Protein backbone atom coordinates (compact mmCIF):
# COMPACT_ATOMS: atom_id res chain seq x y z
CA UNK A 1 0.00 0.00 0.00
CA UNK A 2 2.81 2.41 0.90
CA UNK A 3 4.58 1.58 -2.37
CA UNK A 4 1.41 2.36 -4.34
CA UNK A 5 0.96 5.66 -2.53
CA UNK A 6 4.55 6.62 -3.23
CA UNK A 7 4.09 5.78 -6.92
CA UNK A 8 0.93 7.90 -7.05
CA UNK A 9 2.70 10.78 -5.33
CA UNK A 10 5.48 10.66 -7.94
CA UNK A 11 3.23 10.30 -10.97
CA UNK A 12 0.40 12.67 -10.00
CA UNK A 13 2.39 15.92 -10.44
CA UNK A 14 3.51 14.85 -13.92
CA UNK A 15 -0.06 13.97 -14.88
CA UNK A 16 -1.32 17.31 -13.62
CA UNK A 17 1.49 19.10 -15.44
CA UNK A 18 0.68 17.34 -18.71
CA UNK A 19 -2.99 18.16 -18.34
CA UNK A 20 -2.39 21.82 -17.57
CA UNK A 21 -0.27 22.18 -20.70
CA UNK A 22 -2.56 20.30 -23.05
CA UNK A 23 -4.35 22.20 -25.80
CA UNK A 24 -7.69 21.46 -27.41
CA UNK A 25 -7.60 21.09 -31.17
CA UNK A 26 -10.66 21.36 -33.37
CA UNK A 27 -11.10 18.04 -35.13
CA UNK A 28 -10.81 18.02 -38.92
CA UNK A 29 -8.98 21.33 -39.17
CA UNK A 30 -5.57 22.41 -40.35
CA UNK A 31 -3.57 25.63 -40.47
CA UNK A 32 -1.73 27.28 -43.34
CA UNK A 33 0.59 30.24 -42.86
CA UNK A 34 0.79 32.93 -45.50
CA UNK A 35 2.84 36.12 -45.80
CA UNK A 36 1.15 38.63 -48.05
CA UNK A 37 3.05 40.30 -50.85
CA UNK A 38 0.38 43.01 -50.81
CA UNK A 39 0.72 44.33 -47.26
CA UNK A 40 3.76 42.32 -46.05
CA UNK A 41 1.76 40.90 -43.13
CA UNK A 42 1.78 37.27 -41.97
CA UNK A 43 -1.49 35.47 -41.26
CA UNK A 44 -2.69 32.00 -40.36
CA UNK A 45 -5.49 30.46 -42.38
CA UNK A 46 -7.62 27.97 -40.44
CA UNK A 47 -9.18 25.38 -42.71
CA UNK A 48 -12.05 23.00 -42.03
CA UNK A 49 -12.95 20.50 -44.74
CA UNK A 50 -16.26 18.64 -45.07
CA UNK A 51 -16.24 15.33 -43.21
CA UNK A 52 -16.52 13.33 -46.45
CA UNK A 53 -14.08 15.47 -48.45
CA UNK A 54 -11.56 12.65 -49.03
CA UNK A 55 -14.20 10.17 -50.19
CA UNK A 56 -15.47 12.09 -53.25
CA UNK A 57 -14.41 14.51 -55.96
CA UNK A 58 -17.00 17.24 -55.32
CA UNK A 59 -16.19 20.93 -55.40
CA UNK A 60 -17.48 22.78 -52.34
CA UNK A 61 -18.60 26.31 -51.50
CA UNK A 62 -15.98 28.31 -49.65
CA UNK A 63 -16.92 30.38 -46.60
CA UNK A 64 -14.32 32.93 -45.49
CA UNK A 65 -14.47 34.27 -41.94
CA UNK A 66 -12.81 37.35 -40.45
CA UNK A 67 -11.77 37.55 -36.78
CA UNK A 68 -11.05 33.84 -36.90
CA UNK A 69 -10.08 33.68 -33.23
CA UNK A 70 -13.75 33.72 -32.24
CA UNK A 71 -15.61 33.12 -35.50
CA UNK A 72 -13.86 29.97 -36.71
CA UNK A 73 -14.55 27.77 -33.64
CA UNK A 74 -18.22 28.84 -33.70
CA UNK A 75 -18.44 28.18 -37.43
CA UNK A 76 -16.70 24.83 -37.14
CA UNK A 77 -19.16 23.62 -34.52
CA UNK A 78 -22.08 24.93 -36.53
CA UNK A 79 -20.87 23.13 -39.64
CA UNK A 80 -20.22 19.90 -37.72
CA UNK A 81 -23.90 19.82 -36.71
CA UNK A 82 -25.58 21.31 -39.79
CA UNK A 83 -23.27 20.48 -42.70
CA UNK A 84 -24.85 18.00 -45.09
CA UNK A 85 -28.05 18.04 -43.03
CA UNK A 86 -29.60 21.49 -42.82
CA UNK A 87 -27.09 23.19 -45.11
CA UNK A 88 -24.65 22.27 -47.84
CA UNK A 89 -21.23 21.08 -46.79
CA UNK A 90 -18.59 23.72 -47.37
CA UNK A 91 -14.91 24.49 -46.92
CA UNK A 92 -14.46 26.93 -44.05
CA UNK A 93 -11.54 29.36 -44.04
CA UNK A 94 -10.80 31.59 -41.06
CA UNK A 95 -8.25 34.36 -41.49
CA UNK A 96 -6.37 35.19 -38.31
CA UNK A 97 -5.30 38.64 -37.26
CA UNK A 98 -1.84 39.42 -38.56
CA UNK A 99 1.10 38.31 -36.47
CA UNK A 100 3.32 40.66 -34.53
CA UNK A 101 0.71 43.29 -33.67
CA UNK A 102 -2.33 43.39 -31.41
CA UNK A 103 -5.68 42.16 -32.77
CA UNK A 104 -6.99 45.70 -32.33
CA UNK A 105 -4.35 47.15 -34.65
CA UNK A 106 -4.69 44.29 -37.14
CA UNK A 107 -8.43 44.56 -37.55
CA UNK A 108 -8.39 48.37 -37.51
CA UNK A 109 -5.84 48.38 -40.30
CA UNK A 110 -7.38 45.60 -42.38
CA UNK A 111 -11.12 46.05 -41.91
CA UNK A 112 -11.64 49.82 -42.07
CA UNK A 113 -12.19 51.60 -45.40
CA UNK A 114 -10.95 55.07 -44.44
CA UNK A 115 -8.12 56.63 -42.49
CA UNK A 116 -9.70 58.15 -39.40
CA UNK A 117 -7.04 58.96 -36.79
CA UNK A 118 -9.52 60.88 -34.64
CA UNK A 119 -12.19 58.14 -34.47
CA UNK A 120 -12.78 57.72 -30.73
CA UNK A 121 -15.52 55.11 -30.99
CA UNK A 122 -13.17 52.34 -32.11
CA UNK A 123 -10.50 50.39 -30.22
CA UNK A 124 -8.08 53.22 -29.46
CA UNK A 125 -6.50 56.26 -31.02
CA UNK A 126 -3.26 54.26 -31.20
CA UNK A 127 -4.99 51.62 -33.33
CA UNK A 128 -6.56 54.34 -35.47
CA UNK A 129 -3.10 55.44 -36.59
CA UNK A 130 -3.11 52.26 -38.69
CA UNK A 131 -6.66 52.60 -40.04
CA UNK A 132 -7.94 52.67 -43.59
CA UNK A 133 -6.00 49.87 -45.30
CA UNK A 134 -9.00 47.72 -46.24
CA UNK A 135 -8.23 47.92 -49.97
CA UNK A 136 -4.88 46.20 -49.38
CA UNK A 137 -6.58 43.51 -47.33
CA UNK A 138 -9.23 42.99 -50.01
CA UNK A 139 -6.46 42.59 -52.57
CA UNK A 140 -4.77 40.10 -50.26
CA UNK A 141 -7.92 37.96 -50.13
CA UNK A 142 -8.51 38.30 -53.87
CA UNK A 143 -5.00 37.61 -55.19
CA UNK A 144 -3.49 35.43 -52.48
CA UNK A 145 -5.93 33.76 -50.08
CA UNK A 146 -8.60 32.57 -52.51
CA UNK A 147 -6.08 31.40 -55.16
CA UNK A 148 -4.13 29.49 -52.51
CA UNK A 149 -7.23 27.76 -51.18
CA UNK A 150 -8.58 26.97 -54.65
CA UNK A 151 -5.21 25.53 -55.67
CA UNK A 152 -4.95 23.29 -52.62
CA UNK A 153 -8.61 22.25 -52.25
CA UNK A 154 -11.63 21.58 -54.47
CA UNK A 155 -13.45 24.89 -54.33
CA UNK A 156 -16.57 25.98 -56.19
CA UNK A 157 -15.49 29.49 -57.15
CA UNK A 158 -19.06 30.30 -58.14
CA UNK A 159 -20.12 30.01 -54.52
CA UNK A 160 -17.87 32.15 -52.32
CA UNK A 161 -19.35 33.44 -49.08
CA UNK A 162 -18.01 36.26 -46.91
CA UNK A 163 -18.70 36.35 -43.17
CA UNK A 164 -17.78 39.29 -40.95
CA UNK A 165 -18.98 40.76 -37.67
CA UNK A 166 -18.63 44.30 -36.28
CA UNK A 167 -15.55 45.78 -38.03
CA UNK A 168 -15.66 42.60 -40.13
CA UNK A 169 -19.21 43.48 -41.13
CA UNK A 170 -18.04 46.96 -42.08
CA UNK A 171 -15.36 45.36 -44.24
CA UNK A 172 -17.96 43.20 -45.98
CA UNK A 173 -20.12 46.25 -46.63
CA UNK A 174 -17.13 47.96 -48.22
CA UNK A 175 -16.25 44.98 -50.42
CA UNK A 176 -19.86 44.89 -51.58
CA UNK A 177 -19.49 48.47 -52.86
CA UNK A 178 -15.97 48.46 -54.31
CA UNK A 179 -15.42 44.85 -55.42
CA UNK A 180 -18.75 43.03 -55.16
CA UNK A 181 -17.69 40.22 -57.49
CA UNK A 182 -15.15 38.97 -54.95
CA UNK A 183 -17.94 37.06 -53.19
CA UNK A 184 -21.31 35.75 -54.28
CA UNK A 185 -22.91 36.05 -50.86
CA UNK A 186 -22.29 38.30 -47.89
CA UNK A 187 -23.19 37.60 -44.25
CA UNK A 188 -22.77 40.84 -42.32
CA UNK A 189 -23.21 40.77 -38.56
CA UNK A 190 -23.65 44.00 -36.57
CA UNK A 191 -21.58 46.02 -39.08
CA UNK A 192 -19.87 49.11 -37.68
CA UNK A 193 -21.57 51.48 -40.09
CA UNK A 194 -21.02 54.35 -37.63
CA UNK A 195 -17.28 54.28 -38.31
CA UNK A 196 -15.70 57.58 -39.39
CA UNK A 197 -18.97 59.53 -39.17
CA UNK A 198 -20.77 57.01 -41.34
CA UNK A 199 -18.15 56.89 -44.10
CA UNK A 200 -19.74 53.77 -45.60
CA UNK A 201 -22.85 55.79 -46.49
CA UNK A 202 -20.72 58.30 -48.39
CA UNK A 203 -18.94 55.46 -50.15
CA UNK A 204 -22.27 53.89 -51.08
CA UNK A 205 -23.47 57.21 -52.49
CA UNK A 206 -20.42 57.44 -54.73
CA UNK A 207 -20.77 53.81 -55.81
CA UNK A 208 -24.40 54.34 -56.78
CA UNK A 209 -23.39 57.03 -59.29
CA UNK A 210 -21.45 54.45 -61.29
CA UNK A 211 -24.64 52.44 -61.80
CA UNK A 212 -22.75 49.15 -61.91
CA UNK A 213 -24.52 45.85 -61.19
CA UNK A 214 -23.95 44.10 -57.89
CA UNK A 215 -24.42 40.38 -58.38
CA UNK A 216 -24.71 39.32 -54.77
CA UNK A 217 -26.98 38.07 -52.01
CA UNK A 218 -26.58 40.01 -48.77
CA UNK A 219 -27.80 38.89 -45.36
CA UNK A 220 -27.42 41.53 -42.65
CA UNK A 221 -28.12 40.91 -38.97
CA UNK A 222 -28.10 42.98 -35.81
CA UNK A 223 -29.21 42.56 -32.21
CA UNK A 224 -32.19 44.58 -31.09
CA UNK A 225 -30.20 45.79 -28.08
CA UNK A 226 -27.73 47.48 -30.42
CA UNK A 227 -30.16 50.35 -30.77
CA UNK A 228 -28.66 51.49 -27.45
CA UNK A 229 -25.03 51.30 -28.53
CA UNK A 230 -22.58 53.92 -27.33
CA UNK A 231 -21.84 54.42 -31.03
CA UNK A 232 -25.42 55.47 -31.66
CA UNK A 233 -28.41 53.50 -32.91
CA UNK A 234 -26.74 50.68 -34.85
CA UNK A 235 -30.11 49.10 -35.64
CA UNK A 236 -31.30 52.24 -37.41
CA UNK A 237 -27.95 52.49 -39.19
CA UNK A 238 -28.40 48.98 -40.57
CA UNK A 239 -31.98 49.60 -41.67
CA UNK A 240 -30.91 52.85 -43.34
CA UNK A 241 -28.14 51.02 -45.18
CA UNK A 242 -30.61 48.37 -46.32
CA UNK A 243 -33.02 51.06 -47.59
CA UNK A 244 -30.21 52.84 -49.42
CA UNK A 245 -29.07 49.69 -51.19
CA UNK A 246 -32.60 48.78 -52.20
CA UNK A 247 -33.44 52.28 -53.40
CA UNK A 248 -30.61 52.29 -55.94
CA UNK A 249 -32.04 49.33 -57.85
CA UNK A 250 -28.62 47.76 -58.25
CA UNK A 251 -28.95 45.08 -60.88
CA UNK A 252 -29.01 41.53 -59.44
CA UNK A 253 -28.59 42.62 -55.83
CA UNK A 254 -30.62 40.88 -53.14
CA UNK A 255 -30.33 42.42 -49.67
CA UNK A 256 -32.26 41.77 -46.47
CA UNK A 257 -31.76 42.87 -42.88
CA UNK A 258 -32.82 40.89 -39.81
CA UNK A 259 -33.12 42.08 -36.22
CA UNK A 260 -32.34 39.49 -33.54
CA UNK A 261 -34.70 40.10 -30.64
CA UNK A 262 -32.90 40.55 -27.33
CA UNK A 263 -29.41 40.11 -28.79
CA UNK A 264 -26.51 42.42 -28.05
CA UNK A 265 -23.44 43.21 -30.12
CA UNK A 266 -21.68 40.34 -28.36
CA UNK A 267 -24.35 37.65 -28.60
CA UNK A 268 -25.57 38.41 -32.13
CA UNK A 269 -22.92 36.42 -34.01
CA UNK A 270 -23.67 33.07 -32.40
CA UNK A 271 -27.37 33.56 -33.14
CA UNK A 272 -27.11 34.81 -36.71
CA UNK A 273 -24.68 32.27 -38.13
CA UNK A 274 -26.94 29.17 -38.32
CA UNK A 275 -29.79 31.17 -39.84
CA UNK A 276 -27.53 32.99 -42.30
CA UNK A 277 -25.87 29.78 -43.48
CA UNK A 278 -29.29 28.19 -44.01
CA UNK A 279 -30.21 31.13 -46.23
CA UNK A 280 -26.87 31.24 -48.07
CA UNK A 281 -26.34 27.47 -48.47
CA UNK A 282 -29.66 25.65 -48.22
CA UNK A 283 -29.44 21.89 -48.44
CA UNK A 284 -30.19 20.69 -51.94
CA UNK A 285 -33.44 18.74 -52.00
CA UNK A 286 -31.94 16.37 -54.57
CA UNK A 287 -29.52 15.06 -51.94
CA UNK A 288 -30.42 12.74 -49.12
Image (tube, rainbow, N blue to C red):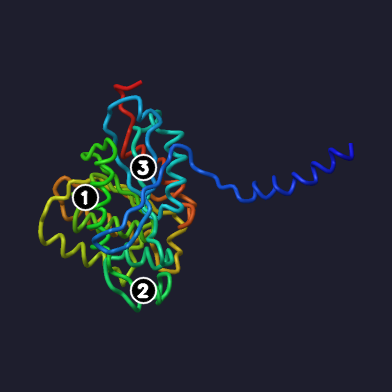
Which residue does the image show at 34% across and 52% down from the upper left? 188
On residue 92, which mark appears? 3
Label 2 neighbour load within 10 Å: few <14, some 14-19, many 20+: many
Point out residue 11 in the picture as x, y percentages from the top left corner.
74, 44
Residue at 36% in and 42% down: 92
The one of 33 and 182 positioned closer to us in this rendering? 33
Which quarter of the picture shows residue 276? top left
* Image x and y of residue 87, in percent: 36, 33
Camera-side residue of 148 and 122: 148
Question: Would you name the residue on which mark 2 appears?
Answer: 128
Please determine whether, in this image, residue 104 is positioned above or below residue 180: below
Q: Residue at x 29, y 48 (%)?
A: 186
Instruction: Tell me which corner region of the image, top left, top right, bottom left or bottom right, holds residue 35.
Output: bottom left
Where residue 169 sits, quadrant-wise, is bottom left
- Horizontal and vertical percent for residue 180? 20, 52
| SS assignment at label 2 | helix
Q: CA distance from mark 3 to mark 2?
A: 30 Å
| Distance of label 1 from label 2 (alpha carbons) | 26 Å
Q: Residue at x 84, y 43 (%)?
A: 6
Q: Callout 1: helix, strand or loop?
A: helix
Classify residue 108 as left or right of residue 213. Answer: right
User: Is residue 80 toward the left or the right of residue 93 in the image?
Assistant: right
Task: Name the spot of residue 266 as percent of width and height, x first.
Answer: 48, 56
Amino acid sequence: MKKWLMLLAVSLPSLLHAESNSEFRIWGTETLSITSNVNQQEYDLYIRLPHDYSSNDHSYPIVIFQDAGFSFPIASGTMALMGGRDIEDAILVGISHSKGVSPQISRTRDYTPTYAPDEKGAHSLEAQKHSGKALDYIDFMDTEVIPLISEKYRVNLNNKIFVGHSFGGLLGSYILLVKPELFNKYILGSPSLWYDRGAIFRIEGEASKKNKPINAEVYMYIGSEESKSKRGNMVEDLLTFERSLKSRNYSNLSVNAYILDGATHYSAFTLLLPDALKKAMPKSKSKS
